[in-house]
Image: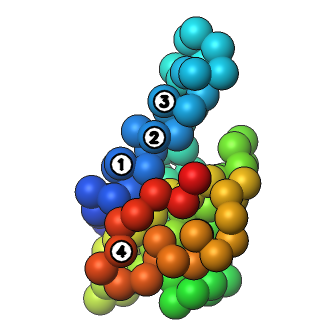
Amino acid sequence: MKIRLLSPALDDLYEGRLFYEKQGEGLGEYFSLFSDIDSLTLYGGIHPKFFGYHRMLSKRFPYAIYYKLEEKSVVVVWRVLDLRGDPKKIRQSLKPGRTSRCT
């Protein structure tokens, strides 16, 4: 399978990196979910659905990767959200056409 990251997902990854950098200088360098995202080439589609998206939980950080399958051969990553946020805001940010922050 191929993976396609939409711009809101890239923005979420950038925001996550900034958050960790604010916690301590250099910590932002350790924030990466790309190994989790890359694993979707093998495991895309096996994760349970929440709010109409497959949701994969990160192994290292309290984040979830929300994605959909496109034509069974492309994983489209829509959002990468911090699960420490308000659940109502997480749900709201996953509505079609929404790209609002959930922090």
- The type of residue carrying mark 3 is Leu
Q: Position of residue 12 (x, y in %)?
A: 44, 50
What is the spatial separation of the Cα atoms under label 1 and label 4, in whole angstroms?
A: 13 Å
What is the spatial separation of the Cα atoms under label 4 and label 2, in whole angstroms?
A: 16 Å
Question: Are circles 3 and 1 on residues that touch, CB within 8 Å?
Answer: no
- The residue tagged 1 is 11
What is the spatial separation of the Cα atoms under label 4 and label 3, in whole angstroms?
A: 21 Å
**Is residue 70 left or right of 41 when viewed as pictured?**
left
Between 72 and 50, which is closer to the camera in this rendering?
50
Q: Position of residue 87 (x, y in %)?
A: 68, 71
Q: Residue at x 69, y 44 (%)?
A: 61
What is the spatial separation of the Cα atoms under label 3 and label 1, in whole angstroms?
A: 11 Å
Question: Are circles 4 and 2 on residues that touch, CB within 8 Å?
Answer: no
- The type of residue carrying mark 2 is Glu
* Marks 3 and 1, the one that precedes in the sequence: 1
* CA neighbours of label 4 inside 10 A, class few (<14), some (14 to 19), many (20+): few
**Is residue 99 left or right of 22 when viewed as pictured?**
left
- The type of residue carrying mark 1 is Asp
Q: Is residue 1 above or below residue 97?
A: above
- The residue tagged 3 is 18
- The residue tagged 4 is 98
Asked which quadrant contains residue 33, the reply is top right
- The residue tagged 2 is 15
Q: Secondary structure at mark 1?
A: helix
The answer to whether residue 59 is visible is yes
* CA neighbours of label 3 inside 10 A, class few (<14), some (14 to 19), many (20+): some
